[in-house]
Amino acid sequence: MSILVVGSVAFDTIATPSGQVTDILGGAATYFALAASYFTSVRVVAVVGDDFGAEHEAVFTKRGVDVRGIERTAGKTFRWGGQYLDNLNEAKTDFTELNVFERFQPRIPKEYADTEFLFLANIDPVLQAAVQREMNGVRLTGGDTMNFWIKGTPKELAETLKLVNVLLINDTETKMLAGENNLPRAAQKVLAMGPQALVVKHGEYGATIFFREGAFGIGKHPFRAPALPIEEVKDPTGAGDSFAGGFMGYVASQGDISREVLKRALFYGGVMGSFAVERFGTARLQNLTREEIDERFQVFRELTHLE
Amino acid sequence: MSILVVGSVAFDTIATPSGQVTDILGGAATYFALAASYFTSVRVVAVVGDDFGAEHEAVFTKRGVDVRGIERTAGKTFRWGGQYLDNLNEAKTDFTELNVFERFQPRIPKEYADTEFLFLANIDPVLQAAVQREMNGVRLTGGDTMNFWIKGTPKELAETLKLVNVLLINDTETKMLAGENNLPRAAQKVLAMGPQALVVKHGEYGATIFFREGAFGIGKHPFRAPALPIEEVKDPTGAGDSFAGGFMGYVASQGDISREVLKRALFYGGVMGSFAVERFGTARLQNLTREEIDERFQVFRELTHLE
């Protein structure tokens, strides 16, 4: 089944201990779309400038991603610069040039009206809510957010959270959003804000999914998918968005949305995040096979499997 | 089979967001011994002062721990004071009074000569090496260390690491010991220093065991045991030592030392660490049942188990 992602397409300038790159294709919607494309058909709504060329569009279309929702406007595409020289787990932002993204007003092409799954990547929660209301016939809405919105626009974010079925954020964001330092308690508070499930991404330690009582099945315990320790982390950019793409893409590829599906999706999220960091930018996500993905799924599964 | 732990017995003064306590029984050897006592017979070598009373000894003997190796000398027992008011994951030390521990010279009672498993808790690596050489007939030696020795006495520590079969340390210590920020690469460097296996404790995220090529069986992948997110962390003190006690205690309780045994031990380590933090000091570890332990083992196992 099809999935629509609404978010940023960007050109990134990145420095890591493994090297540096300038103006390479990135952005949350890009990483998400490529990761999800190995599981299901993907549609994108985003905005780019006139520096977005045929070679950039080809990155999407080669993976079969529907780009009719990528709007081109006069000006430059969103640019981000950051480095991970001291700490591979946290980016230090060098610059952010919003450019055409500053006036982003998501427009959903008519052809996208039958989309069944929706992912609201990290953008202004007011825009996230507007998109979700326009697409309110979808079977499942996933969403992301960040400290900027948690601190800056809490009221608007609270409205959006009521419309999101599965929220995917990291440990720090979960604790900040809940105002609570204990993770399981923070998760319960976030679930009380709206989502039926909360996926907390732990970076190199994997991710945990917490369920609201009775949501997607029964059982009171959370579920955790570990990640394999990666020897070659070339560039952590986009790991979280690739995780979300693997997670949502796998869910969209399944007939039903059960806890067992969401648990497997958590593993696939970790798999796609782990591939993403092996090369700079989206290079690794552009050239995977489903066999490689399922092989790593198996390795991740065995990582914690007792006989 | 019996296990001997050599390390500190202390009186701790602790403040956490849940309350504060003064001069309660603690120390690495204490947490280790109590945790291991649910799996196998435990012997302790430590030193205490004349303030160590019958009520403190009873904490060990009630759990069947052999205390003939706890030496009493004139003076006060080792005291530590610390707080976790800002961050439950990291202690801020208020004071350290070594007292009788300053001149600790481990003396192994003759009756301990037939001990089959040895754990060198975090003490001066020179003492660790001396104990291991005296007990060199043991089947397996586990060990711990900390930043103080990694930075302060690297040569002495290097000698000790050649005598340790399984080293149990945390992420930060692993990276510091290896001088390498990538965990899997750091693990390989540490294994090259001597140990056949390295257990890296990730706190609330569980632990990973890395194997030297060919050690304890075949296979190139590490193994990870997750920990359940704990809602009630009253006092994190001793979590790592309780982990080590559960891990080594389970290994000592088994006939053979295979990878499958070490993997299960990793889960039992996480289980005992998670019990330890539920109450101040050793309170929870004093009053457990094997049923409660195996029930949580099952919960931890299901935490990452796909159907």
Image (cartoon, coloured by chain):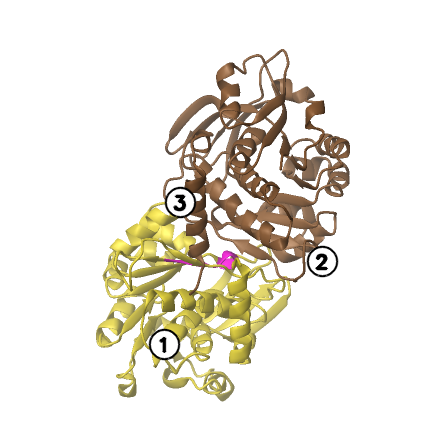
Chain colours: A brown, B yellow
Badge 2 element: loop
Q: Chain of mark 3?
A: A
- Give the vertical position of A31 relative to B197 (above or below): above
A127 in relation to B158, above or below: above
Disc 2: which residue: A214
**C-alpha span from label 3 to label 1:** 32 Å
Mark 3 — residue?
Answer: A230
Mark 3, other Cα within 10 Å: few <14 / some 14–19 / many ≥20: some
Tell me: A72 left or right of B93.
right
On whether disc 1 and disc 2 are found on a single subunit, the reply is: no
Relative side of B180 to A235, left or right: left
Tell me the kind of residue under disc 3: Ile
Separation of residues labelled 1 and 2 (CA atoms) = 40 Å
- Please name the residue shown 56% across and 58% down the image: B88
Left or right, A281 with respect to B212, comes to: right
Q: Chain of mark 1?
A: B
Image coords of residue B174 (percent x, y): 37, 53
Please give left or right for residue B29 compared with residue A98 in the image.
left
Q: In this rendering, do the residues under marks 3 and 2 share a single chain?
A: yes
Question: In the rendered image of this protein, does residue A64 appear above or below residue A274?
Answer: above
Q: Is residue B222 above or below residue B185?
A: below
How far apart are the two marked residues, 3 and 2, measured between alpha carbons? Answer: 35 Å
Residue at figure coordinates x 30%, y 70% from the top left: B141
Q: Position of residue A45 (x, y in %)?
A: 64, 26
Q: Residue at x 63, y 46 (%)?
A: A255
Quarter of the image with the C terminus of chain A in it: bottom left
- For the residue labelled by badge 3, is the local secondary structure a helix, a strand or a loop? loop
Badge 1 amino acid: Gln
- Which residues, given as a range, are shown in magenta? B203-209
